[in-house]
């Protein structure tokens, strides 16, 4: 290829690191013995064909199955399913097939659904129904008529979209109050929390570790970068893509997970960190992740239900993180949903300020 043609090809290269995150919880009834982990690998592979990605690795323990994908990750627990995919994947296209597979396991009622993503850098390259949030909401509404959609952050700059549905608990009369409370407790028996840290404008020297010209394998990049020290109790499954890019899943004996996905190219560098590790304060974890990757800006979102250690601690994060670091907080919003609290915050700084 001639030099001029090579420059054009390099200029046109782009990969959308921003992921689409879909999480669904099903209601478990006393007489029902289903388990989403009983769904077979061929059935998952068929489902993921609708998403336009493939399984490249797999680990499991007594609580959770973790699939490393060609475009990010999938986690399967007894009654919870999580799919996180980047690039031009189409996760919403697999919803109907997922609901059919869940029904075969005896799950016929969804208690919670969360679909979220940051705004795309180049939305024009996405495939339907992901060409815009309005299109995604329209698609989800066709399946969940009582769903609700939200946009946090600045809609004309950096923002984060959320679509959510929670099964309501109906109280018909005073004598039914106890029953309604029992129903609500039943729906939220499992403590649940999720933290995401979405980072952009990463330090180019840090990003060199996630290139095949620097390391040959995922474990080498994991150890060199310090990823294995973020949550040391996690059993890690990692992969270094050719010529560059990195993905990892981690699971621990409590059934908690973490996942990191890295697009290292300097012009559109992006790193996402996600975990459901149960902590009563996330300030130290956020600081460790940010110090590991050295972004120029990042978004933090934290979901926590009423049974979670993190449910009442989000205001502490608002105070502590702004005082423990010299980051400039450009936005912060807190939302209260029927069974969950949500914190959204944006931070920025100059890459040159890193010590």
Image: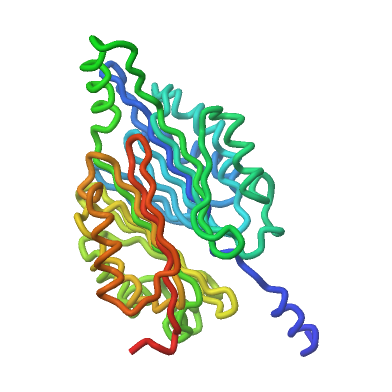
Residue 341 shows in the view: yes
Where in the figure is residue 351, as x and y percent of width and height?
Answer: 44, 84
Where in the figure is residue 118, as x and y percent of width and height?
Answer: 52, 58
Question: Residue 294 or 254: which is nearer the viewer?
Answer: 294
Quadrant in the picture for residue 217: bottom left
- Quarter containing the C terminus: bottom left
Where in the figure is residue 148, as x and y percent of width and height?
Answer: 51, 37
Where in the figure is residue 71, as x and y percent of width and height?
Answer: 53, 57
Residue at horizontal 39 percent and vertical 64 percent from the top: 238
Residue 247 shows in the view: no
Residue at horizontal 54 percent and vertical 64 percent from the top: 158
- Vertical placement of 33 versus 279: above or below? above
> Left or right: 185 with respect to 267?
left
> Left or right: 110 with respect to 226?
right
Residue at horizontal 61 percent and vertical 67 percent from the top: 15
Quadrant in the picture for residue 156: bottom right
> Left or right: 213 with respect to 283?
right
- Vertical placement of 308 versus 238: above or below? above
Residue at horizontal 30 percent and vertical 28 percent from the top: 187
- Vertical placement of 238 versus 186: above or below? below
């Amino acid at each position: 290829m001639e030099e001029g043609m090579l420059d054009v090809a390099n200029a046109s290269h782009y990969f959308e690191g921003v992921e689409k995150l879909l999480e669904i919880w099903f209601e478990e009834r006393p007489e029902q013995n289903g388990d989403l982990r009983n769904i077979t690998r061929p059935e998952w592979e068929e489902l993921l064909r609708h998403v336009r990605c493939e399984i490249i690795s797999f680990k499991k323990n007594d609580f959770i199955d973790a699939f490393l994908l060609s475009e990010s990750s999938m986690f399967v627990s007894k009654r919870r399913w999580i799919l996180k995919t980047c690039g031009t994947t189409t996760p919403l296209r697999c919803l109907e097939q997922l609901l059919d597979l869940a029904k075969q396991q005896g799950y016929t009622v969804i208690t919670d659904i969360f679909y979220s993503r940051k705004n795309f850098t180049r939305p024009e390259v996405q495939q339907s129904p992901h060409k815009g949030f309005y299109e995604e909401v329209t698609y989800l509404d066709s399946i969940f008529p009582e769903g609700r959609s939200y946009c946090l952050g600045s809609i004309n700059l950096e923002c984060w979209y959320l679509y959510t549905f929670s099964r309501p608990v109906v109280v018909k009369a005073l004598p039914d109050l106890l029953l309604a409370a029992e129903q609500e407790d039943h729906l939220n028996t499992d403590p649940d929390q999720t933290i995401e840290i979405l980072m952009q404008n990463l330090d180019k020297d840090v990003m060199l570790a996630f290139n095949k010209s620097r390391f040959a394998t995922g474990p080498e990049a994991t150890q060199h970068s310090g990823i294995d020290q973020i949550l040391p109790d996690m059993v890690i499954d990692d992969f270094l893509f050719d010529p560059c890019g990195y993905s990892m899943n981690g699971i621990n004996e409590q059934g908690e997970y973490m996942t990191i996905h890295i697009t290292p190219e300097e012009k559109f560098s992006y790193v996402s960190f996600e975990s459901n590790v149960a902590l009563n304060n996330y300030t130290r974890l956020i600081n460790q992740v940010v110090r590991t990757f050295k972004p120029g800006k990042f978004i933090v979102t934290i979901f926590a239900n009423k049974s979670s250690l993190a449910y009442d601690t989000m205001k502490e994060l608002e105070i502590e993180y702004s005082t423990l670091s010299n980051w400039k907080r450009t936005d912060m919003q807190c939302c209260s949903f029927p069974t969950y609290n949500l914190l959204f915050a944006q931070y920025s700084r100059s890459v040159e300020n890193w010590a």
